[in-house]
């Protein structure tokens, strides 16, 4: 039974989320502030964290930053509806998804299941399946990424995005198509979160994120991975 850590200082929200998640066959543990969230995450090692950004003391962004230093545990953020800047920053720090308050508890359960699917229910693939595109090498089963021979630590969401793009160099993917690839919930505001994940991915793999070598923006459409045409243009 997967374990979910709910972190929020509003007891009503914690109780509501716990009731629906337990009904969906999750084990639930809770914390009401950032310090206890980190302690619980380290001791219980949950499968996923539902994290409010507006916490007393250590806020949710700092908790996200600390969790990402220690692990790739999936994180679903809870944010106020008008906190777009915090949402984007949270995604750039490595959170996997977000949901705005007030929220439907059924939607929260759906988001939790979707994030866990892409981290633990990858479709069966041949042993040793690799994706190689230029000097980017992905070992899919192990979720290991190398760029120029150096290991790169990616979250499950970042890895799946890079895998999707690198499997078909030169193909243009819309945000909606990339969202489908990571099993997200397709609606426009969340499609824009793809931009934050791509920005974070570029920061990890690009020598100069301002002048991408691997992941190119196709303005008004989406993104594509570099192909032979880009190699020719650079030579």
Image (spheres, rainbow, N blue to C red):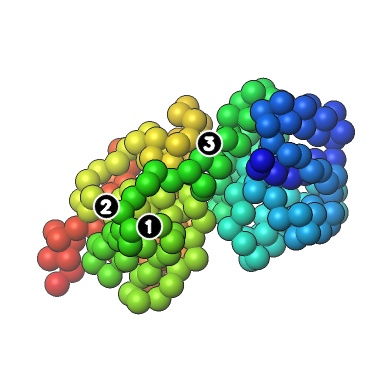
- The CA distance from mark 2 to mark 3 is 22 Å
Q: Is residue 72 above or below residue 79?
A: below
- The CA distance from mark 1 to mark 2 is 11 Å
**Residue in the image at 44% along x and 59% along y:** 143
**Residue in the image at 80% along x and 54% along y:** 40
Which sits in the foreground, 70 or 206?
70
| Circle number at residue 167 | 2
**Residue in the image at 63% along x and 30% along y:** 109
Name the image quarter holding residue 178: top left
Q: Is residue 129 above or below residue 53?
A: below
Q: Residues within 10 Å of mark 1 (few under 14, many from 20)?
A: some
Q: Is residue 80 above or below residue 231?
A: above
Name the image quarter holding residue 202: bottom left
- The CA distance from mark 3 to mark 1 is 19 Å
Q: Residues within 10 Å of mark 3 (few under 14, many from 20)?
A: some
Q: Earlier in the sequence, mark 3 or mark 1?
A: 3
Q: Earlier in the sequence, mark 2 or mark 3?
A: 3
Q: Is residue 125 above or below residue 117?
A: below
Q: Is residue 90 left or right of residue 11?
A: left
Q: Earlier in the sequence, mark 1 or mark 2?
A: 1
| Circle number at residue 114 | 3
């Amino acid at each position: 039974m997967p374990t979910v850590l709910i972190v929020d200082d509003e007891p009503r929200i914690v109780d509501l989320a716990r009731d629906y998640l337990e009904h969906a066959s999750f084990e639930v543990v809770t914390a009401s502030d950032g310090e206890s969230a980190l302690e619980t995450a380290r001791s219980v090692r949950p499968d996923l964290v539902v994290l409010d950004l507006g916490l007393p003391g250590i806020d949710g962004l700092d908790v996200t930053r600390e969790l990402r230093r220690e692990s790739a545990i999936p994180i679903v953020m809870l944010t106020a509806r008008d906190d777009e800047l915090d949402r984007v920053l949270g995604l750039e720090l490595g959170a996997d998804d977000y949901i705005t308050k007030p929220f439907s508890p059924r939607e929260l359960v759906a988001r939790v299941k979707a994030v866990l699917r892409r981290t633990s229910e990858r479709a069966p693939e041949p042993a040793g399946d690799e994706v190689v595109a230029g000097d980017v090498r992905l070992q899919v089963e192990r979720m290991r990424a190398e760029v120029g021979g150096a290991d790169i630590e990616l979250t499950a969401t970042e890895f799946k995005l890079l895998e999707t793009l690198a499997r078909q160099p030169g193909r243009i993917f819309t945000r909606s198509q990339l969202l489908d690839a990571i099993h997200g919930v397709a609606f426009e505001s969340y499609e824009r979160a793809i931009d934050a994940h791509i920005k974070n991915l570029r920061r990890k793999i690009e020598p100069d994120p301002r002048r991408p070598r691997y992941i190119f923006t196709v303005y008004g459409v989406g993104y594509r991975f570099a192909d032979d045409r880009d190699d020719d243009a650079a030579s």
